[in-house]
Image: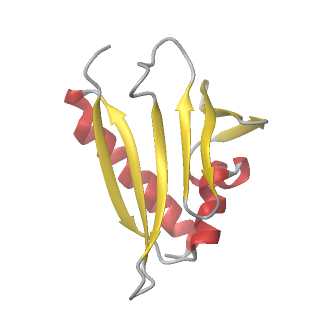
Amino acid sequence: MSGKKLIQLEYIINCSPKVLFNRLSTAAGLTEWFADDVRVRGNLFTFIWGKSSQNAEKKIHRENKMVRYEWIGEDFEKDSNYFEFVINQDDLTNDVSLTIIDFTEEDEVTETRSLWDTQIAKLKHLLGS
């Protein structure tokens, strides 16, 4: 595997940063919209989709601001093996946005964007956003 492409997606989410952060940083919150099941031991998260699972370590945790998960495994390149959620709140309008940073193969950008769009639609529905 080589040449992973960084993608950055931004979504407006109508809820407080605290409520949103809980859905992005806890096993219970992530299970509601991101994976079928999430198990946690310390900073090690196991994401389960159907019969497959993938381990990630929570590397950065800034309360109500951002969280980064770094994939663990030999299939992942050192510099492009993470995904990150960043919560921003506009000082003037108080609008809350969620920025997602992820990496994908050059020929899978459209599919990856579509997958995130679907997952964020689930998250927004869950939050009543």
Give the left or right position of residue 9, taking residue 50 as reference: left
- Picture layout, residue 39 above or below residue 128: above
- Picture layout, residue 92 above or below residue 36: below
Locate residue 48: give its quadrant. Answer: top right
Give the left or right position of residue 5, taking residue 13 as reference: left
Q: Residue at x 56, y 38 (%)?
A: 69
Give the left or right position of residue 89, taking residue 36 as reference: left
Give the left or right position of residue 34, taking residue 32 as reference: left
Q: Position of residue 111 (x, y in %)?
A: 28, 39
- Picture layout, residue 9 above or below residue 13: above
Q: Residue at x 62, y 41 (%)?
A: 36
Residue farthest to the right, as pictured: 41
Q: Quadrant of the N terminus?
A: top left
Locate residue 110: give its quadrant. Answer: top left
Q: Position of residue 6 (x, y in %)?
A: 30, 37
Q: Position of residue 125 (x, y in %)?
A: 51, 68
Residue farthest to the bottom, as pictured: 92
